[in-house]
Amino acid sequence: MLEILPIPAFKDNYIWLINDGRHAVVVDPGDAGPVFQLLEQSGLTLEAILITHHCHDHIDGVVELISKYPVPVYAPAKEFYDFPHTPVADGDLITLAALDLKLTVMEVPGHTLGHVAYYSQPLLFCGDTLFSCGCGRLHEGTAEQMHQSLQRLAQLPADTLVYCAHEYTLNNLAFALELEPDNLALQKRQQEVIELRTADKPSLPTTIGLELATNPFLRCDNNTIRQSLKLGENTVPAETFRILREMKNNY
């Protein structure tokens, strides 16, 4: 039985630790300190590191971690890294034998050009591509690329658990409710997240099903959203997405 633990880092990052009670894998360790602390407290042995993209808040702990734990590091083939790693590309299968876990690599460009996600139903580790009720900024890719990446993730089963890398949910919900103030699923989700955050608990993971019901970036074909943006019914979803992303940049 696998357990997924959030390791808070910096202002709003989550480093995800996958473990079976003995062995562990970490996703996007931007800071080594809290990872070392949890490994030692829990008596876990690090077996591998997964990287979704090259932003510093996702990789800056890698060198320190592998200096103590010489484990394989899996990172996107289309990005440059100055530490030893195994490049991974779309469709690759990563076998983590110690955890009896196999993860499929999905290329999801947009936030960065080489960004990948790691998927093993029902687990999805998607870095800064899909957020709870939001999506990543376009640091390198185009709106079209990000829209396609999000649509690809949206095709996963509704019960897929989405482990993204930042605690942005409350802000994202406020933005979404300005677009769809009568969306009951959004209203319910906001109340749930307020309660979680008041108790200092993560709002994550979310699910693909919940995102399809509440995330405006997955609902670009929704007439209410188009009307809120004063767009015609014939506006293609990719253009709606582009406008939404620009609005969120300034929110």
Image (cartoon, rainbow, N blue to C red):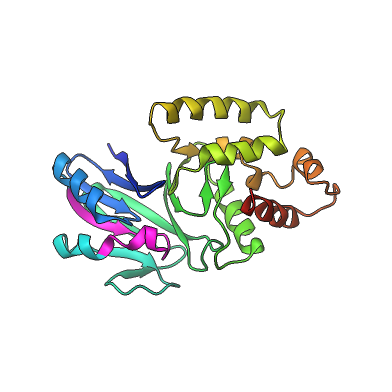
Image x and y of residue 198, in percent = 43, 27
Confirm whether the magenta stretch covers residue 46. Answer: yes
Residue 42 image offset from top left, x and y in percent: 17, 40
Instruction: Note whether 225 is above or below 184 in the view shown.
Output: below
Is 91 colored magenta in this rendering? no
**Residue span colored magenta:** 45-62
> On the picture, is 92 further left or further right than 170?
left
Q: Residue at x 28, y 64 (%)?
A: 73
Looking at this view, is 22 or 115 the one in front? 115
**Numbered label tally:** 0
Nearest the eye: 97 or 77: 77
Look at 58% across and 57% down and name the residue there.
149
Residue 227, image quadrant: top right
Q: Position of residue 161 (x, y in %)?
A: 45, 40
Q: Horizontal placement of 245 versus 24: left or right? A: right
Q: Is residue 17 visible?
A: yes
- Residue depicted at 64% across the width and 52% down the height: 250
What residue is drawn where x is 52% and y is 60%? 108
Identify the image quadrant of the N terminus: top left
Between 91 and 151, the one nearer to me in the picture: 151
**x and y, in percent, of residue 57 in the image:** 38, 58
Residue 155 visible in this rendered orientation of the protein: no
